[in-house]
Amino acid sequence: MSVLIIVFLTAVVALFSGVFEQGKFARYIGILGLIIALYVSFLPECTFFEHYKHMYEYSSNAALFTKISIVTTLLLFFLGGFAFSNHRSHQSELYALMLFALCGGIVLFGFQNMVTLFLGIEILSIPLYVMAGANKTDLRSNEASLKYFLMGSFATGFLLFGIAFIYGSTGSLDLYKIHDFGVSNPGNVMFTLGVLLMLCALAFKVSLAPFHMWSPDVYQGSPSLITAFMASVVKISGFFAFFKLMTIGFAGAFYDWIHVLGVLLIITLLLANVMGLAQTNAKRMLAYSSVSHAGYIALIFFGMNTLSTYNLAFYLFAYSLSTVGVFMCLIWVEKLKRETSFNAFKGLGKSEPLLATVATISLLSMAGVPLTAGFMGKFALFSQAINSAPFLVLVAVLGSAISIAYYLRLIIAMFFFKESTFKTSEKVTLTYNIVAVCIIVSIIVLGVFPDLFAKQFGL
């Protein structure tokens, strides 16, 4: 909880820096606060907060996911100077809202109670509804904000109905008491209905088809840095909360929901990858890519073992690094070309080779090409699920093969056009180059030496 308080206070200071017309310093305030929070996340939790263990517990798993979320948010903040250069009048609000959303994610990592789960999801979601519409003069951004808000409210209704059914059947909101009820009362109709309603609500949050309808429009309309935040930090938070709820709270009703999840996984992998092939806009393609990765990550529920939580963390971190790597390239192109079609990327490899390289390595990692972190992440998930759900693994492999086609379209646009369409003297900043090198090295090193992930995050 110490980390949560630090991030919250950082968000408040960043927000009020705008009141004193010092919004340009909000990014530096956020970076400093996140570095302090990352340092504190490696320290033992203060004993004072043990009084709140029945609501929130900063366990070793919560600490691990908190660390990877903070690292990802830090990378995005480093990119913010260029990405938010046209939001000078309200930069402090955007950085503060990102930090408030991160607070919601940290709450989700340690929730022990359905009330804490609900609060975490809403603290995570409400700032996103505002940030999606940050480009006030852009109709797509306005549409993204409204659509995300309406669909998010709809999903919240499912969540609250599910919690009501769970409370009505168990008489408790505590995660472990709910687990005990599920074990001792298999087949309880009200409990099963609550489980399925909450499954639908969380499937929306992590973009599992057919609850993904909001993703393409919201991803395309939102400012690109916010989209990157949604595709990385929000997915980390949502999936760990999903995993924790289903494997602890609803473990007793495992056979009631696992088959439903299997059907959602098949729909997600096939639909998202086929739709990804049909896209002509890189940002929209990445939205469907994000949906497909939700399908791959959902394999974590099949063949679970003692390494499942670690495998989930590794995959989410690898995917988040790749997401930041692709989006930093997309942000640059969008700022210069004011569009994100595949054609806009033509010749980028000639004008900005480092930026094109980090995007290429990130896309190859997303596709699961060997010697990348994404390959090791997929290999771990597929190996875990192969014995209990071989058909689902086969569908996932097929989906990965399809995804290579639309990832290659972007790579070809960047490197295989001799004439560069970038007629500008503006060059990538030093910060961009440093972040690009860090991401390239991290993806390759984790792909060759995956055990370094455990060492770097104190495992």
Image (cartoon, grey):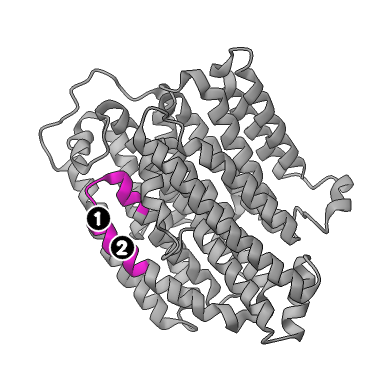
Q: Position of residue 276 (x, y in %)?
A: 28, 57
Query: Which comes sooner in the sequence, label 2 or label 1?
Result: 2
Q: Is residue 360 above or below residue 178?
A: above
Check disc 2: other Cα within 10 Å, few if <14, some if 14-19, many if 20+. Answer: many
Q: Is residue 97 above or below residue 360?
A: above
Tell me the number on the disc at residue 170: none
Question: Which residue is rendered at x = 42% and y = 22% of the image?
Answer: 85
Q: Is residue 247 left or right of residue 299?
A: right
Question: Which residue is rendered at x = 16% and y = 30% of the image?
Answer: 421
Q: Check if residue 359 falls in the magenta segment.
A: no
Look at the image and tell me whether residue 372 can be seen. no
Which dot, 2 or 1, sits closer to the camera? 2
Which quarter of the image is occupied by the C terminus? bottom right
Q: Is residue 88 left or right of residue 9?
A: left
Residue at the farthest left position:
418
Work out how far the residue at label 2 is from the one at label 1, CA to CA, in angstroms: 9 Å
Q: Which residue is mark 1?
A: 406
Q: Who is closer to the viewer here, 252 or 423?
A: 252
Which stretch appears magenta?
Answer: 269-287
Which quarter of the image is occupied by the N terminus? top right
Tell me the number on the disc at residue 273: 2
Q: Position of residue 443 (x, y in %)?
A: 43, 49
Name the magenta segment's main secondary structure: helix
Q: Amino acid at mark 1?
A: Tyr
Q: Position of residue 63 (x, y in %)?
A: 69, 51
Secondary structure of the residue carrying numbered label 1: helix
Q: Who is closer to the viewer here, 376 or 122?
A: 122
